[in-house]
Image (spheres, rainbow, N blue to C red):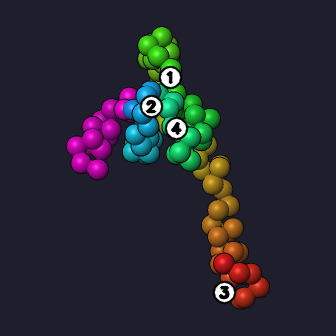
Amino acid sequence: MGILAELYGIGDAAWVGGGFRTGLHSVIEPALSELWIAAGAARSGKYPEVPELVHQKQLRLVDGVEAARRWLAEIRERPTDALRSEWRRWRSEVHLGASERIARRAAEIVSGSRRV
């Protein structure tokens, strides 16, 4: 991580490199810092977190200058703190019950009633 992670910690938005002609750089660090994220779409499909981040409107895949301008205008008008709360609530709801599912699966494997 390093200095980029420190910058994510004080920012409100991040432009993630790549995604236009070559592959997209990882969006996970700015996502975990609860930043607005924009990036190009090239090879974004190789990251399983991209669809989730797009769905919760934390990540915008842009295809050029005008789309980037629209994204910047939108994030200037929306309060980041309120959205961070919304993102946390959404993630909690998505993963609700995960511990029970994991424990149930582990018990099945340990008891031999289910194979790994």
Q: Determine if the magenta segment contains residue 12.
A: yes
Residue 38: x percent and y percent? 45, 28
Q: Earlier in the sequence, mark 2 or mark 3?
A: 2
Task: Check disc 4: other Cα within 10 Å, few if <14, some if 14-19, many if 20+.
Answer: many
Q: Helix, strand or loop at disc 1?
A: strand
Q: Residue at x 69, y 67 (%)?
A: 101
In the picture of the structure, the residue carrying the numbered disc 3 is 110
Q: Residue at x 50, y 15 (%)?
A: 67
- Outermost residue on the right side: it is 113
Tell me whether circle 2 and circle 4 mark residues in contact (CB < 8 Å): yes
Whole-angstrom CA distance, mark 1 to mark 3, is 47 Å
Whole-angstrom CA distance, mark 1 to mark 4, is 11 Å
Number of marks present in the image shown? 4
Q: Earlier in the sequence, mark 1 or mark 2?
A: 2
Q: Quadrant of residue 96?
A: bottom right
Q: Amino acid at mark 1?
A: Val
Q: Earlier in the sequence, mark 1 or mark 3?
A: 1
Whole-angstrom CA distance, mark 2 to mark 3, is 44 Å
Whole-angstrom CA distance, mark 2 to mark 4, is 7 Å
Choose mark 1 or mark 3, whichever is in front.
1
In the picture of the structure, the residue carrying the numbered disc 2 is 19
In the picture of the structure, the residue carrying the numbered disc 1 is 62
